[in-house]
Amino acid sequence: MGIKKILVIAVLVSVFNCTSKKDAYLFTSFREPATEGLYLAYSEDGYHWNDLKGPYLKPDAGASKIMRDPSIVRGKDGTYHMVWTTDWKGGDGFGYASSKDLFHWSDQEYIHVMKNEPTVVNVWAPEIFYDEGEDRYIIIWASTIPFRYEKGEEEEKNNHRMYYVTTKDFKTFSDTKLFLDPGFSVIDCVIVKREKNDYALIIKDNTRPNRNLKVAFAKSPLGPFENISEPYTGFLSEGPTVLQQDGKYIIYYDNYGEKNYKAVSTSDFKTFEDISDKISLPEGHKHGTITTVSRSVLNGLIEKSKEK
């Protein structure tokens, strides 16, 4: 075998090894009626998602023992931290569990973040964001506290605002504080870091005539978020999650009015391109979040999915 051929083979092997070790994307999900637990999907390109089936964690936290809106983040040490909605109505907290491989999980915990609000109606769609600058996790969620804010067009029990806590270890948490009051009912927020001191916040305007997605901006992940945009999705859309790739951001969202998933692409959060015809997701996929998964963990999940 010639030297040139040997070099070509060596380069191909090297490229293959680098590619094979590259992280993939992981999308958390659930299936209605949300009693089964965690479902997963993965993607190599960020557009086409392969079903890893489920459930991988049967919910046992909260009074209703459901799992909706599972939000997951991969920590610096490779541990995955996940929070989720445990009750459609009632309850003063959300579920939490962690895992190294996404099928062996810690004991589930119920985090009572609204325990000091006796009239709280709900705790919806907790979302985790890792704040690198402060080496902490920020968890945001939507709650309604009747008669706390101007209700506008909303009923008192459907007038949401966003709240947050921070934690470094998921054992001790900061006091609960108001995260966002835009002057109208808001849910399903997602923090996106663009650059240092430059953050975007995807929000759902949950007022009856709108129920669509908008974006706001801030210099800190805790805000204040201002300059709320006009909507860039249609009526009855929610559950956004964001994937950053090649200088662009892909925003996936649950287009629940038409019972399908859609996505838009943006580089500046000012102009948005509908790329829904370029994506594919497993049937029944519902509101979750996207993170990355190592090749070794993904291989384990693929093998596990064959048993389901």
Image: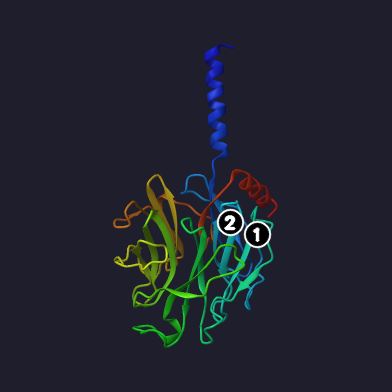
Residue labelled with disc 2: 40
Residue in the image at 62% along x and 77% along y: 64
Q: How far from the left and from the top, in percent, is residue 124?
A: 51, 73
Q: Residue at x 35, y 61 (%)?
A: 219
Type of residue at label 2?
Answer: Leu
Q: In this image, 198 relative to 64: left or right?
A: left
Q: Quadrant of residue 85?
A: bottom right
Looking at the image, do the residues carrying marks 2 and 1 touch, with CB atoms under 8 Å apart?
A: yes
Amino acid beneath label 1: Tyr
In this rendering, does residue 179 appear at all? yes
Asked whether, in this view, residue 33 is left or right of residue 193, the answer is right
Instruction: Looking at the picture, tell me which residue is in the foreground, 73 or 42.
Output: 73
Q: Is residue 298 left or right of residue 250?
A: right
Q: In x, y percent, where is residue 268?
A: 31, 54
Above or below: residue 32 compared with residue 199: below
Residue 10: x, y in percent?
56, 23
Q: Residue at label 1?
A: 56
Residue 31 visible? The answer is no
